[in-house]
């Protein structure tokens, strides 16, 4: 490419070159040159959301599903501030993302001009890097660097600010950049041998999976490794679909609301082998799920220094390497050493079988209440009718305890959720998931608090005619916060009431088909009717009153 084009046009051509085919945004006058260039692009689907947080949450979902960055964009000042929650989510969750900000003209930057913000300071602690373009010649190199940063090492969001006069400036003869590669450690065999020796020495070894939500070769290798060694496997916090839940060695996912058998197994483990960001704070409950002197092994392309702090008095062995490469080496070594595999299986399989049996029987003591809808029954029935290849997105909130307990991620099911606990994620992430993998069924689950924060994206989903099912659990309170209040200040709830919101009527006003479940005898019939329909569908669940859970 050697023609003379504006920076705005170059940016769009770069997206096409890099096969970034989704652009989530709220329009702003600071980047009209980009919008004009998108008008002529047959390859990029530009999706106008109703709030900048919806744009960044949708981009995060896209990144989680595809492993490559989408682009989200907002205008300066307030628009960028609104975008920031999804940027922080991508940073904490380690999701690749390119976040673009239309900036004031270069001549008035840092002058206190209308909507002028120091974005380096604003985004600095919640992104991998913030680039402020001050000349059009910088753009090609910055885009190349930004893409590399977003995708490699500790994946995450990169922010680029683009002054409106730069976007309108001409680039002469610039070549479109290509994505650089990155080589990881070639010591996989040495790492694998070290891990197998730790497993051999351990009495209660445990694998912890924080691999990608869309199960790929890494997950297949871990499943094979578990079968070869007899070791049980836990999913990490909100990495529920990173390992096949129907595998005979899977014993549940750790985190808020995890089954007792899962938490107990973590506490008992004297050797925890984690793949990916397995030492995340909630996954190990700040370190309280790890016993003293436990041998912890973490294999990841990036290891956060906080892992050391959360390991307490245990011994952390961190290996910065390709998870796939190390898993491949582990499986290969096991296959070549029949004696090792035989001994490991004989030692580990009886315990693993017992843990799996306890996990499968974890619902035996569930109560079936009769007032309003029982969430045990609701989520158990959703699990039965939900498609085996569904993508499930969820908000943060107390309701998610039941999702973790009842929704199984075997087959091709995928789970996407905000590891950082961001509210408002459920609805826009369902949007991002559906436009990413449009042939897959998508279910979004949210509480009433999170739904109120991004309810406008129901209109975006309806406008695009997307086949999405949203489940809203409407109990009229901020459940997680009220649970904390009840624990610290019993019977002194304050500020946690949401009010009487009819989400069915709200959704109907935006073109959705809606249903309401407010008693147990409605659950099966409503869900069967919902799955027989197409298009945007919303189920409002009025749940029974449960003891609020924090575990």
Image (cartoon, rainbow, N blue to C red):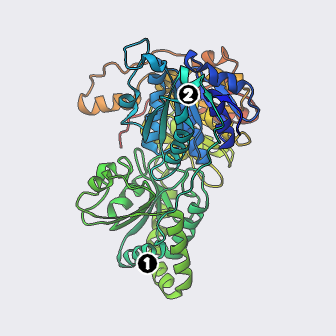
Residue in the image at 50% along x and 21% along y: 452
Q: Quadrant of residue 196?
A: bottom left
What secondary structure is found at the residue carrying circle 2? strand
Residue 74: give x, y in percent of width and height.
Answer: 53, 24
Along the line of sight, the residue nearer the viewer: 361 or 175: 175
Using the rendered view, name the quadrant where residue 224 is placed.
bottom right
User: Which label number is shown at residue 73?
Assistant: 2
Whole-percent x and y of residue 119? 41, 27
Q: Nearer the viewer, mark 2 or mark 1?
A: 2
- Badge 2: residue crowd in 10 Å (few <14, some 14–19, many ≥20): many
Separation of residues labelled 2 and 1 (CA atoms): 46 Å
**Quadrant of the image containing the C terminus:** top left
In the rendered image, the vertical position of residue 318 relative to residue 467, given as above or below: below
Q: Earlier in the sequence, mark 2 or mark 1?
A: 2
User: Mark on residue 193?
Assistant: 1
Q: Which label is found at residue 394?
A: none
């Amino acid at each position: 490419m050697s023609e003379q084009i504006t920076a705005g046009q170059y940016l769009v051509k770069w997206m096409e070159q890099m096969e970034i085919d989704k652009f989530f945004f709220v329009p702003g006058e600071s980047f009209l040159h980009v919008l004009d260039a998108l008008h002529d692009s047959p390859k990029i689907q530009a999706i106008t959301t109703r709030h900048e947080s919806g744009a960044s949450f949708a981009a995060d979902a896209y990144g989680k599903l595809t492993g490559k960055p989408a682009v989200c964009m907002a205008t300066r000042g307030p628009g960028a501030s609104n975008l920031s929650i999804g940027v922080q989510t991508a940073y904490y969750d380690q999701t690749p993302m390119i976040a673009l900000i239309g900036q004031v003209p270069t001549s008035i930057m840092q002058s206190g001009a209308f909507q002028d913000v120091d974005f380096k300071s604003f985004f600095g602690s919640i992104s991998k890097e913030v680039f402020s373009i001050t000349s059009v010649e910088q753009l090609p190199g910055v885009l190349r660097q930004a893409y590399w940063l977003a995708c490699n090492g500790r994946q995450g969001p990169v922010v680029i600010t683009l002054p409106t006069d730069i976007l309108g400036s001409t680039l002469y003869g610039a070549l479109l950049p290509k994505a650089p590669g990155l080589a990881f450690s070639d010591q996989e065999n040495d790492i694998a041998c070290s891990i197998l020796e730790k497993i051999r020495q351990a009495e209660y070894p445990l694998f912890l999976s924080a691999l990608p939500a869309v199960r790929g070769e890494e997950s297949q290798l871990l499943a094979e490794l578990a079968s070869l060694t007899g070791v049980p496997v836990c999913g990490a916090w909100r990495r529920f679909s990173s390992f096949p839940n129907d595998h005979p060695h899977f014993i549940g996912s750790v985190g808020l609301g995890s089954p007792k058998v899962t938490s107990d197994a973590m506490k008992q483990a004297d050797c925890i082998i984690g793949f990916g960001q397995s030492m995340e704070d909630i996954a190990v409950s700040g370190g309280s799920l790890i016993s003293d002197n436990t041998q912890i092994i973490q294999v990841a392309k990036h290891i956060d220094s906080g892992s050391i702090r959360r390991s307490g008095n245990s011994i952390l062995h961190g290996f910065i390497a390709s998870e796939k490469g190390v898993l491949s080496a582990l499986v290969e070594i096991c296959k070549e050493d029949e004696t090792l595999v035989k001994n490991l299986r004989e030692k580990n399989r009886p315990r693993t079988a017992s843990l799996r049996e306890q996990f499968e029987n974890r619902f035996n003591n569930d109560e079936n209440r009769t007032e309003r809808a029982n969430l045990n029954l609701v989520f158990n029935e959703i699990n039965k009718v939900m498609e085996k290849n569904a993508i499930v997105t969820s908000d943060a909130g107390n309701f998610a305890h039941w999702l973790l307990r009842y929704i199984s991620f075997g087959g091709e099911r995928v789970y996407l959720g905000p590891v950082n606990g961001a509210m408002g994620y459920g609805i826009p992430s369902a949007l991002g998931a559906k436009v990413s993998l449009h042939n897959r069924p998508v279910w979004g689950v949210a509480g009433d608090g999170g739904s109120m924060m991004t309810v406008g994206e129901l209109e975006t989903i309806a406008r695009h005619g997307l086949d999405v099912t949203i489940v809203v659990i409407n109990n009229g309170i901020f459940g997680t916060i009220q649970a904390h209040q009840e624990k610290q200040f019993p019977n002194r709830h304050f500020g946690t009431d949401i009010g009487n919101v009819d989400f069915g009527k709200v959704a109907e006003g935006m073109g959705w088909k809606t249903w309401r479940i407010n008693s147990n005898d409605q659950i099966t019939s409503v869900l069967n009717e919902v799955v027989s329909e197409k298009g945007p569908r919303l189920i409002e669940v009025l749940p029974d009153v449960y003891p609020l859970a924090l575990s």
